[in-house]
Image: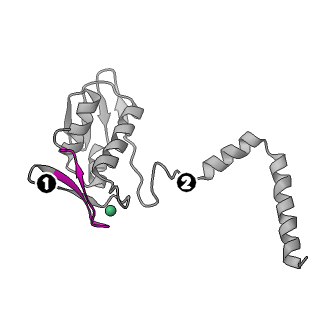
Amino acid sequence: MGFSALLTLKSSRKVEIMVDKFDYKQLLQRLMNNLPEKSTKSDWFEVPRAQLSVTRKRSEIENFKEICDLFQREPQQLYLYLTKRLGAAGTIEGNKLVLNNQVSQEQVDALIKKYYEEYVRCPVCGRPDTVLEKKGRLYFLKCLACGAETPVKNPLKG
Ligand SMILES: [Zn+2]
């Protein structure tokens, strides 16, 4: 047994001892906290969360315009997408989207993520650098990174 093999053996023993000291659940939690969330975001792009303020009669997405800018989409498209699915009437006021009912953070965040996956992210390479193009009556998601064109539903029908 060479010197390096001995070292390896020693260090792996050390690790075992450390594991023993931790409560298993605690250790698992530590691991989870350190892991990047591969399934929800990519290395180069993070789907934004809504900055939501909700009162009894209305909800405001304060960073609505920012989200549209980040997605490089017309506010009208995301507006239609959200209001239809949230069953709300709404108006765009400056940078905000004001909805006439109460919505939850989870609802809004899930829809923004879904919109991103349907209308922004290229399904071929996973990048967000895309544009929506209309050809005849059909809409395509065109990827500026890999060139793929993917048919999508009419974004103006919500
Ligand atoms: Zn692509």
Residue stretch rendered in magenta on the structure: 139-155
Mark 1 vs mark 2, CA separation in Å:
36 Å
Amino acid at circle 2: Pro
The residue positioned 24% from the left and 38% from the top of the image is 81
Q: Please give left or right for residue 105 compared with residue 19 in the image.
A: left
Q: Earlier in the sequence, mark 1 or mark 2?
A: 2
Q: Residues within 10 Å of mark 1 (few under 14, many from 20)?
A: few
- Mark 2 lies on a secondary structure that is loop
Q: Quadrant of the C terminus?
A: top left
- As drawn, which residue projects farthest toward the left? 136
Q: Please give left or right for residue 83 compared with residue 20 in the image.
A: left
- Mark 1 lies on a secondary structure that is strand
Q: Position of residue 111 (x, y in %)?
A: 34, 38
Write down which quadrant ligand 1 falls in.
Answer: bottom left
Q: Quadrant of residue 59?
A: top left
Residue 155 numbered tag = none
Vertical order, 100 against 18 (above or below): above
Label 1 within 8 A of ligand 1 by Cβ? no
Q: Position of residue 21 (x, y in %)?
A: 84, 47
Label 2 within 8 A of ligand 1 by Cβ? no
- As drawn, which residue projects farthest toward the top? 56
- Quickly name the residue at label 2: 36
Residue 134 numbered tag = 1
Q: Nearer the viewer, residue 126 or 18?
A: 126
